[in-house]
Image (cartoon, grey):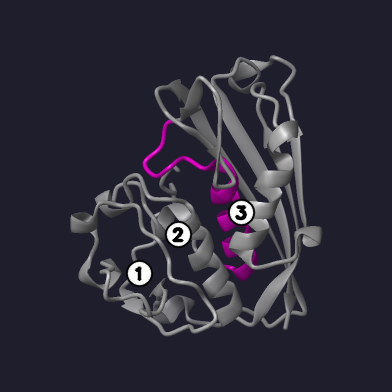
């Protein structure tokens, strides 16, 4: 997950804990000693509310987004494939000799789904909220990013109408894994599997995607006002 090239010094991301009884407790596979105090979980915190990221905008950008009945977002992500890394797609470990080199777990599908939701909401992208320059996100499970984007979506008063994702890779074939990926992504988003669609394409052996040196994903999401 590459950090965004956009620099917006007026946008801050202080961490706080917001009670949300409708969300499950997040599991942070990051190193505990790298997390700020508000993100460190203990065995006695089984009922601790989901940690959240509050986004505060400067006065110049404080005008609220227009309330619309529908909002559409698009997400894109690409990762280099290298030996020695696991290939994780949609939270599922896919057997392959190469995996995504990344700061987090390199889940190309979850990363672009997060960007699609954030884009629909008119919020900063995943690289700004979870920068790869921050050691606390090193090796993190990308479900952390998904759950935070879902929290922000509900907080804004929206829910997912439908989501369509396309994975682009030459190998391995994803047909045997698509149903599992779809079921897991639906569970992470808290939606019925019927509103989630997963497609997979090769790149006809063209460029880094077709030469099995990278993997990419596109996602389009429709959000509906509750």
Q: Say which of marks 3 and 2 sits in front.
A: 2
Q: Earlier in the sequence, mark 2 or mark 1?
A: 1
Magenta stretch, main secondary structure, is helix
Is 111 in the magenta?
yes
Q: Residue tagged by mark 1?
A: 13
Q: Residue at x 55, y 23 (%)?
A: 96
Question: Crowding at label 1, few (<14), some or many (≥20) Cα neighbours within 10 Å?
Answer: few
The residue segment tinted magenta is 101-122
> Residue 179: x percent and y percent?
73, 45
Image quarter hosting the N terminus: top left
Q: Position of residue 90 (x, y in %)?
A: 59, 46
Element carrying mark 1: loop
Point out the residue furthest to the right here: 194
Name which residue lies at 45% across and 59% down: 144
Q: Earlier in the sequence, mark 1 or mark 3?
A: 1
Labels 3 and 2 touching (C-beta < 8 A): no
Question: Of residues 55 and 93, which is closer to you in this image?
Answer: 93
Would you say 63 lies left or right of 51 here?
right
């Amino acid at each position: 997950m590459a950090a965004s090239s956009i620099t917006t010094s007026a946008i801050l991301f202080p961490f706080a804990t917001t009670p949300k009884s409708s969300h499950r407790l997040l599991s942070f596979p990051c190193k505990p000693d790298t997390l700020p105090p508000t993100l460190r979980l203990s065995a006695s915190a089984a009922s601790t509310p989901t940690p959240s990221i509050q986004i505060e905008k400067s006065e110049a950008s404080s005008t609220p987004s227009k309330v619309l009945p529908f909002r559409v977002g698009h997400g894109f992500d690409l990762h280099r494939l290298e030996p020695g890394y696991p290939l994780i797609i949609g939270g599922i470990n896919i057997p392959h000799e190469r995996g995504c080199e990344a700061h987090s777990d390199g889940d190309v599908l979850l990363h672009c789904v997060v960007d699609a939701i954030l884009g629909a909401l008119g919020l900063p992208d995943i690289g700004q909220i979870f920068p790869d320059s921050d050691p606390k996100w090193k090796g993190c499970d990308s479900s952390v990013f998904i759950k935070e984007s879902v929290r922000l979506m509900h907080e804004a008063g929206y829910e997912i109408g439908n989501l369509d994702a396309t994975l682009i890779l030459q190998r391995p074939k994803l047909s045997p894994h698509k149903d599992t990926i779809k079921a897991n992504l639906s569970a992470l988003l808290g939606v019925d599997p019927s509103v989630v669609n997963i497609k997979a394409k090769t790149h006809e052996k063209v460029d880094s995607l077709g030469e099995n040196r990278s993997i990419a994903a596109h996602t389009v999401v429709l959000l509906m006002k509750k």
